[in-house]
């Protein structure tokens, strides 16, 4: 969970507990590639509890009796929190639990978020497919499945007074991976499609509007 590959996971019997002492101020945390029922994040500062949050990861929506008996159980694969209190001496405890299977976590990342702007409605979720399909002389197919790398294309509306900060961010993240979240609500149906642990291929800032800039982002998972 501490490498940069979401398709590799730390796995063990429930619960999986991790204690972090960042040593610097952080205000956000991302858990990606999850297989679990719930996550609890708690923070202490100087031995005093200052934050605790438990998130139920169940996404099973039962609408009738048929769903109740036959609908498969599903859980959220990712969770991003943006409200951690930024104490320099914070001790962060993350507990991942499951009542039925081994818990898994692909990535655990802490840091300080930078607000760029609001993602517009024309965002796209795409992927780079490295699988191959070949045919022999008889027309028979040879399918070799390989990794699919998620990518997104999105437009972001940014206020003019944030442009200089965003330009600094673009320089700092040149060939540097980060967590890019298009939505701040992990339970939203579009959240996972716009969540990338990776780097930008394109980061242009169009300053044609008088009070806002339109940012074009092309993001690709590491």
Image (cartoon, rainbow, N blue to C red):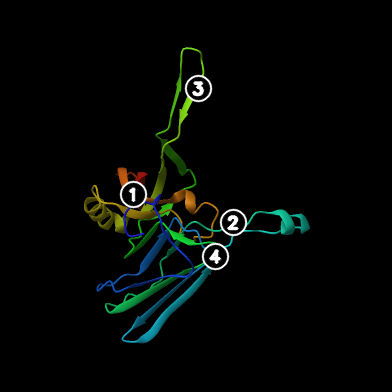
Q: SS for tag 2?
A: loop
Question: What separation in Å lies between label 4 and label 1 (alpha carbons)?
Answer: 26 Å
Q: SS for tag 1?
A: strand
Which numbered marker is on residue 167?
Answer: none
Q: Pick whichever of labels 4 and 1 is earlier in the sequence.
A: 4
Tell me the residue at 50%/73% (across/down). Answer: 54
Q: Pick whichever of labels 1 and 2 is earlier in the sequence.
A: 2
Tell me the residue that label 3 is attached to: 141
Q: SS for tag 4?
A: loop
Q: Quadrant of residue 56?
A: bottom right
**Between 145 and 79, the one nearer to me in the picture:** 145
Number of other residues with Cα within 10 Å of mark 4, as a class: few under 14, some 14 to 19, many 20 or more: many
Where residue 205 appears, as percent x and y from the top left, is 30, 46
Which numbered marker is on residue 74?
Answer: 2
Question: What separation in Å lies between label 1 and label 3 (alpha carbons)?
Answer: 33 Å
Is residue 26 among what the camera can see? yes
Q: SS for tag 3?
A: strand
Tell me the residue that label 1 is attached to: 198
Tell me the residue that label 4 is attached to: 37
């Amino acid at each position: 969970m501490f490498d940069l590959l979401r398709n590799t996971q730390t796995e063990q019997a429930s619960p999986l507990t991790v204690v972090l002492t960042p040593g610097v101020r952080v205000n956000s945390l991302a858990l990606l590639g999850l297989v679990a029922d719930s996550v609890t994040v708690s923070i202490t500062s100087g031995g005093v509890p200052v934050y605790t949050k438990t998130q139920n990861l169940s996404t099973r929506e039962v609408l009738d009796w048929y769903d109740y008996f036959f609908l498969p159980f599903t859980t959220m694969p990712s969770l991003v929190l943006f409200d951690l209190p930024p104490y320099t001496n914070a001790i962060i405890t993350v507990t991942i639990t499951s009542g039925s299977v081994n818990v898994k976590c692909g990535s655990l990342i802490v840091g300080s978020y930078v607000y760029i702007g609001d993602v517009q409605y024309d965002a796209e979720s795409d992927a780079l497919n490295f699988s191959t399909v070949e045919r022999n002389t008889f027309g028979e197919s040879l399918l070799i499945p390989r990794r699919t790398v998620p990518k997104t294309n999105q437009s972001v509306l940014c206020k003019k007074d944030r442009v200089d900060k965003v330009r600094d961010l673009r320089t700092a993240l040149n060939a540097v991976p980060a967590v890019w979240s298009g939505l701040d609500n992990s339970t939203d149906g579009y959240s996972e499609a716009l969540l990338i642990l990776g780097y930008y291929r394109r980061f242009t800032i169009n300053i044609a509007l008088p009070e806002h800039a339109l940012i074009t982002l092309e993001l690709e998972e590491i």
